[in-house]
Image (cartoon, helix red, strand yellow):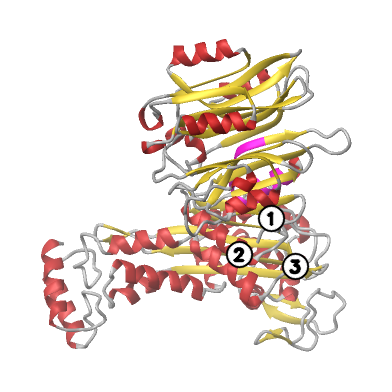
Amino acid sequence: MIAQSNPELFTNFPRARRAPACLASLAALALVAAAHGAANPDRDNTAKTAWWYFTNATHADIASKVGEGYRPIDLEPVDGTSPQRFSAVFVRDTGSFAKDFDWNTGRTEAQVNSALSTNGHRLIDIEPYEDGGVIRYAYVSIANTGDDFSPSNWWIAGRTEQQVRDFASNNNARIIDVDTYLEGGVRKYAAVLVSNSGAMQRAHTFLADATPAQISAVIGQGQRVVQIEREDSGTYCVLLEAFPPSVNHHWWFYGWSSEQISAFTGQYGVRLIHLDRQPNAAGPTTYSGAFVNNLNAPETRARDIMDADIDDGFWGFYCKRVNGGIVSALQHDRPFEPASALKLLHHVRAMRAIDNTGGAINLLSQYNYLGGGGIVGGVNQPGYDSCPNPNDPWIQQIALGTVLGWMMVQSDNEATWTITTNFGGFNGLNQTAALLGMDDTFVQHHIGCGTPPNQVTLEDLGRIHENVSNGFLSPQSRTAFRNIMINNWSQNLQNIIDQEFASAGMPGFYRPMFQNQIQYATKGGNYGLGGTAYRTGFNWISIPHKSGCLTSPREFVYGGYFNQITNDTPAGSQTALSRAIHEQMREQIRAAINSWMGGCIGDINQNGSVGVDDIFAFLTMWFAGDGDFDGDERTDVSDIFAFLVAWFNS
């Protein structure tokens, strides 16, 4: 959850997009819209993209970023700077964000108009500012063509609030950019407008000298903030507009520090569409602005699940195909305290030692174990210490395979102490981490003791599994490494599998075949430290994907964590973490199921080809009452016809 406090952030996940009524008491301009256009397209485009922002940039800084392949979408003059500086927001000028664009600063009105005429552009941002007593302009423009075409467009400056409203009303125009500034100490406004008709039509509201409460009132009527600039103390010049179909999430803020902006963009996977810097001679510089979503579909779902039940701390998730690309990631490269999930590193170090000692160490080798009765049924037995005590009198000899099982299944910390102390200590673990490319991992306490903190990233945990898949362990040790771990998957993953089975209409008798070929290994962990909760889950999975009639498994590493949260509950944050972790796999599960539903669905006996033997295999299942081929949860004659059609088409 996102706290709404001062300095404040407000969010709006719209459930309805109704046009607002005119708000005369707010001196607002609200124009009803029926369609959604691309008047200022970068506010509507929620495709995931690279982006950047400056809080105090020179013209040269902006030009340098443009030279790196970025396109400015918002420039805001910073008051009281000489030479003039700007806050600036950029998107990567590629893919769906690629535009024929122009920008400049320090221009006169005539120079702006000349550039627009020469380039065939229209403005998306105009920024007047006073320079040596003379009004100059910074601007951003795009080509007035294609989806961005507006048959009529204008820009005005040096107007009063009412003159801006009158101009829009008299020309049936939609305001897409509005800015406030002082000219000779007098409050003035500038605006960019397009024709409020056809594809460009959209409900919008211009508020001047508005309080946060007044802004929230308009948001409550189904609009979002796209610009917010401070006017006088406590009030703002704001532009809001109706939600286009592409935008399902929206955030706006005021009174923030630069550190808060950085933390929020990292935690929530958003990008700025507007940023206004507000210097304060009597205190710290603050900022106001607005965000849109900048995550792909699985990332957005996982983020929203976590956000609904976690109020503070920090958290993240990660999913990557082994030897392939990243599926989803949020704060996956941020170091965190993993608690017992870090035992994955202890586990791989011990298994690597088995491979490297030529048989001198094996799973039957005996080692000192401190914990007496250990953990049975989740209950600590006499002599077991969560923070291992090396002076424990309950020492006994236990086989290495048993110790590893206790460490990875029961999450026994004293078993973990046995591995740490007999396989090179903290230095040995950190050396193995370095060998695996785990550059952000550092072990410095026995798990269970809590301090000083250990650290890892989700990327680093994934590297353990990827290296194991790629030969870091021998085939025999690789199999043992995974089999020793928990191999039963979460009900939250099972729910996704069942939902995707149903959606694809997979025949009921195929479902156990599919699931029996899934391989899975998991390790989690949790701490309570200083009144806050830490929890991690990390998994390796192999899914039976088919290429033609042959099964070609696809491996993934995925997980998630939260650290330093105060509202930890089984039904809330813990369930949210598990759901978010597994939600990342939905598209991958779907793709695998769909591969089974493809051209080789007639391969009933799963021998890699479709033949007469599959007819006999199907009829055997049908007569046994397990022949639901058409997915209606009944075995009847219609299943025979459905199967024969699929068989002939395979």
Image position, residue 109 (x, y; %): 58, 14
- First to last magenta residue range: 260-275
The one nearer the camera, 555 or 293, is 293
Q: Is residue 334 visible?
A: no
Mark 3 or mark 1: whose residue is earlier in sequence: 1
Q: CA distance from mark 3 to mark 1?
A: 21 Å
In the foreground, 330 or 169: 169
**Disc 3 versus disc 2: distance between alpha carbons?**
14 Å
Q: Position of residue 608 (x, y in %)?
A: 23, 64
Picture layout, residue 335 above or below residue 144: below
Neighbour class for label 1 at 10 Å: few (<14), some, many (≥20)? many
What amino acid is at disc 2? Ala
Tell me if 251 is positioned left or right of 97 in this view.
Answer: right
Instruction: Note whether residue 426 is visible.
Output: yes
In what quadrant of the picture does the N terminus appear?
bottom right
Front residue of this view, candidates 196 and 378: 196
Please give left or right for residue 166 compared with residue 76 in the image: left
Eyeballing the image, is 228 above or below 269?
above
Residue 566 got which mark? 3
Measuring 36% from the left and 29% from the top, which residue is drawn there? 146
Residue for badge 1: 456
Which amino acid type corresponds to the residue marked 3 in the rendered image?
Thr
Local packing at callout 3 (Cα closer than 10 Å; few below 14, some 14-19, many 20+) is some
Q: Is residue 301 above or below residue 172?
A: below
Q: Pointer 2: what residue?
A: 308
